[in-house]
Image (cartoon, rainbow, N blue to C red):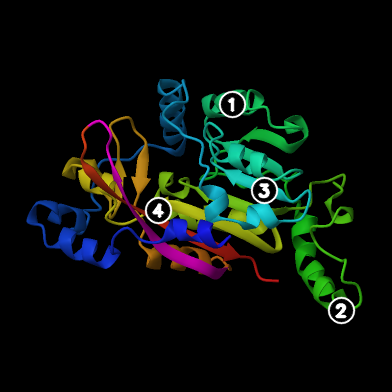
Amino acid sequence: MGREAEYFSKDFDWEKLKQEVESNPSLSYHFQPFDSISPSLPSPSQDSQAWNQFHIRHSTGRFFKERRYLLKEFPELLSCDEYSKVLEVGCGNGSTALPILRGRDNIIIYACDCSNEALERANKMIEVSNVGSVAHRFHLFHYDFSTTGFPKWLACDSCKGNFLQKQHDQFSDAEENKDISLNNSSSLRESNCCIGGVDFVTLIFTLSAAPLHRMPTVIRECFSVLKPSGLLLFRDYGLYDMTMLRFEPDKRVGFREYMRSDGTRSYFFCTDTVRDLFTGSGFNELELEYCCVKSTNRRTGKSMRRVWVHGKFQKPF
């Protein structure tokens, strides 16, 4: 996996970009304190409707490319145990789920989105992908992650309460029985009440679509359905990304928060904010860094500097 790890070598230095941006007077409005006395923002239902309309406008699916880099960024998805379970939060048209299903036989994905249109597109995308045994490995459900808790069939209250005991049992029995694992086939049998939690949660360009004040609730919900030692895999927009700097002053709806003309929103993360959000919800930080990629617009020939935040967080054993 050595060469794949090189994928994240920096094309430019984030600190130098920060200095350049913050010394540019024409961009200073991005860093001004935000006036909290502002017009009322859309309700959660309006946020969901905006994303539904977004997916209708981009119904051909060409707007979203299959995220084949994910298996390089998160090789744990390739090396995990058979029948490991992934919860994909904010699945869109399936561009994240597809490479995971291609890359790992027997992995099971539970994918949700607040947009019914997105779920329909994801279902069609996976159906025509020729990936084996998809019917038994890919499960879609409608869910608005920023307003309600995850459905009990992912992890019921009883199972959540038992996770701590399972952590203790797993540690105590490890030396006596090397085959015991929270991910083994016996522990994957679904109970009558729920599927018993998941091994991975993916938040790929999803959390930024929620208002900042709702993000802690989203992360706590993800934490609650993960099994002990489970991983949350994170990738989202980073501070000083090209798309952030393109927003006009009237598109600001908060500090580092913006709303597009179509009603969809976007937040741009610094690593400190990401760290505080996840560790404050009980996660251990494994990896956290800026991913700085320089690319060229094929049509205009202009250079584009993209900034994303990459993170891996683990629920304690």
Tell me the CA gap for discs 2 and 4.
Answer: 44 Å
Query: Which comes sooner in the sequence, label 2 or label 4?
Result: 2
Circle 2 residue: 175
Circle 1 residue: 125
For the residues labelled 1 and 2, say whether their Cβ atoms are less than 8 Å apart. no
12 or 211, which is in the foreground? 12
Tell me the CA gap for discs 1 and 3.
Answer: 18 Å
Q: Which residue in the rendered view is the most extreme toward the front?
A: 3
Question: Is residue 292 in the magenta section?
Answer: yes
Query: Which comes sooner in the sequence, label 1 or label 3?
Result: 3
Quick check: 59 above or below 145? Answer: above
Give the amino acid at mark 4: Leu
Tell me the CA gap for discs 2 and 3.
Answer: 28 Å
Quadrant (top left/top right/bottom left/bottom right) for the C terminus: bottom right
| Residues packed near mark 4 inside 10 Å, few (<14), some (14 to 19) or many (20 plus) | some
Q: Position of residue 127 (x, y in %)?
A: 66, 24
